[in-house]
Image (cartoon, helix red, strand yellow):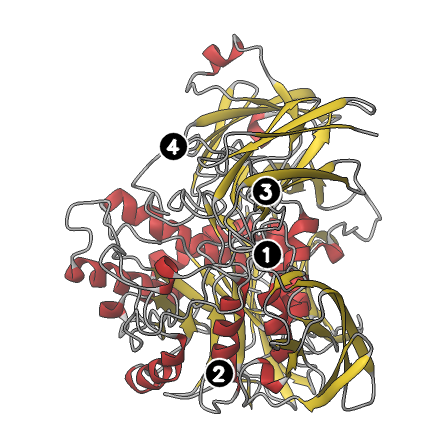
Amino acid sequence: MKKSITNLNYLLCIVSIMLCAEFLFAFNVSNQSPLRTKVNINSNWLYAEYNTNSITELAAFHAWKSIDLPHTWNNEDVTDLIPGYRRSASWYKRELAINSMVEDQKYILYFEGSNITTKVFVNGKEAGTHVGGYIGFEIDITNFIKTGTNEVLVRVDNSFNPEIIPSQQSDFFIYGGITRDVWLVTKPKFHIASIQITTPKVSQKNASLAINIILENLETTSNVQLKAEVFNPLGKKVATKVVSINSQETLITFNNIKNPELWDTKSPNLYTVSVELIKNKQITDKLSDRIGFRWFEFKDHGPFYLNGKRLLLRGTHRHEEHAGVGAAMSNQQHRADMESIKEMGANFVRLAHYPQDPEIYKACDELGLLVWDEIPWCRGGVGNDVWKTNTKNQLKEMIAQNYNRPSIIIWSLGNEMYWLPDFERGDDIEKMNAFLTELNTLTHQLDPSRKTAIRKYYEGAHIVDVFSPSIWSGWYSGSYKSYQKAIDTYKKEYKHFLHAEYGGSSHVGRHTENPITGEGQIQSEGWEEAIVQTKVANIAQIGDWSENYIVDLFDWHLRISETNPTFVGNVQWAFKDFGTPLRPENDIPYMNQKGLVDRAGKPKDAYYVFKSYWAEKPFTYIESHTWTERQGPENIPRTLSVYSNCSKVSLYHNGTLLGEKQKDISKFPASGLTWDVTFKEGENTLMAIGVTNTGEKVSDTLIVNYRFEKHDTAAALKLSSKKLNNGNYLVKATAVDDKGLRCLDYEKKVYFQCLEGGETVKNQGTPTGSEEIAMSNGEASIEVKPNQKGGKITMMVLNQSFKGTYLNFISN
């Protein structure tokens, strides 16, 4: 126990760099220079895609490229059409100008994340290393720098290494590079290393607060004091205390904070805790962080409670990547993901399958999103002693870095850990459970206030506090109509059961009047996911990947979870499409297409299903804005769904009211908001008007082109172009029959190529950013960037059936 606490104290030194910047530039009473500084140094780096361990050899390399951080060398090669992606080492270089060295000042490089192993050199000498790609770390460069110009070299390596989690078997890419922000931090030699904040007792009327403060480089306790202050969400001071110290570790407690403004998912109230280090009556250091007062409970075989009230966990998952940049996302992109998740109405997010950028935790604290934080023990089984040490270190770092975050309620110890072992006997249950028990014990030693969890390792379910079995009703096994039976089964079996991961893939723009449900083709009662899929009949294999089917699947799941008073909740997989090396044959190659939004963050139909159950801001959405070309016999009505969170909705067809309906979440589909529409040939205008309980009105309009004539077999591909607002062009391929009718059932892959005059915006993993893509209802598109205005652009599209169609147009 003592050794674990010592390790945590060492790790908490890192945390001081990350703490809230509201008091970052603190001045002493003499109004001297800042006690601490934190300067972003993302700009003006040089990059060398050159794998050498020797800085002497590196000195002879001259093909450096100018870049800014965050950066990954895998931003496009993971989603190009060439198997594999670069798993190797690269170098980064930057000059640091130090105008003058301040005596008794420490100089730190803080990396928010660098994947997977990092080695830092300053002025030709090794300054430090770090193992693990998803946790922030600091490199003390004080003894390596000088006044004037200093050279910083950073070697980052994402080579295959089974001794470092995550496993190569994982269903996501392991991006190489300095994928997050880097900072130059200065602080006094004698400083506050960390403040670790807990809220031992919280109620509506009263709360207690404990601040564990660790000092670094303490030489004497004489005339040294610590001053702690607590500020409410409006910045008003509500508590203060000054204590003398007698060791490098001090505990300051506040036992009577009256009527605390609680942190919850609708009102995420954040308090600020500020700590000053005072020596000889001078403020010599200052550190602060934000915290929230809340308490939570998983009822045995029952629901979840936050601050004494039942809260249905409405969750999703997030992978850290985006089209065009991979894992090297900007803070604005991180924030946009979380705001979109919150706008959908979610109150819970599982960070899959690794700790994520500090901006994500900041956003969750501010937006009111509860968090399942997870170390990247994802598949690969248990490893050797080096593997175990690395894994435990990543766990310690995750807890130390994110300890004060009120949004986090679960530390996850792994996902599908027993799958596909990387080491001999790595899936041995006895060995697995022994190490899992070690991790669980360590976690509770480091943080007794939160719960531990794992997903889909049944033999270890009894070890952790919260368990998620595998339930993929309607995708990897069975029918989605088996979902109720699945959750009823597991609620009884597991004391604290939270369902993480459900859903399925959808290809944007693919629709059908009769989605494949598997009835009569699959065993309807199953819900498990098999490791090997070749002997399993499921919708993932025989389905059409239409947006219609996934809308129905999610609608069914949500109807059940929203009407079950003893259910903890569920966590949809996954919020955004993401890259994976394990899915080269998908409709967009190397993309897991289970997202509610595409890889660029654009919502699919399924996003609006979740909004209809969860969102607060009124809306209506006619299914579907990517289904505007339809066909069918004359005078045969089509059932049309409207997804809305309004209490009642009216639907108009070509100006004629088809009726007003009340929303009823016990009904399926679309909570009863369905109408039979008899389309006219040609253009049909649909308008849905929703009315809230307070009388507020919202509307949605959709134009559908409908034809009575059924197309014949595809006979050709036709190309067309349209200029976009960004100056690029969208080139569209359409499968047509001999009469020129669009073949709405054509789903074969097509291959785009720009032959002259421009370049495709490729390797994005999006519906308009892949040179290889399966058609959706006989159509596929790609964005093209012209080389110059007025230039000729020649495009080609082909597949096995059609050997080449060409389009020439002039950019303007």
Does residue 218 appear in this view? no
Q: Check if mark 1's residue and mark 2's residue have beta carbons within 8 Å.
A: no
Q: Residue at x 52, y 39 (%)?
A: 750
Picture coordinates of residue 55, whole percent (x, y): 48, 16
Report which residue position mark 1 lands on: 509
For disc 4, the neighbor class at 10 Å (few under 14, some 14 to 19, many from 20) is: some
Q: Quadrant of residue 406?
A: bottom right
> What's the residue type where badge 2 is placed?
Ser
Furthest toward the top, the residue is 60
Q: Depth check: 10 or 392 in front?
A: 392
Residue name at image x 46 percent, y 50 percent: 10
Q: Amino acid at mark 3?
A: Arg
Q: Which mark is residue 159?
A: 4
- Indicate the amino acid at tag 4: Ser
Is disc 1 placed on a helix, strand or loop? Answer: loop
Comparing 771 with 45, the one in front is 771
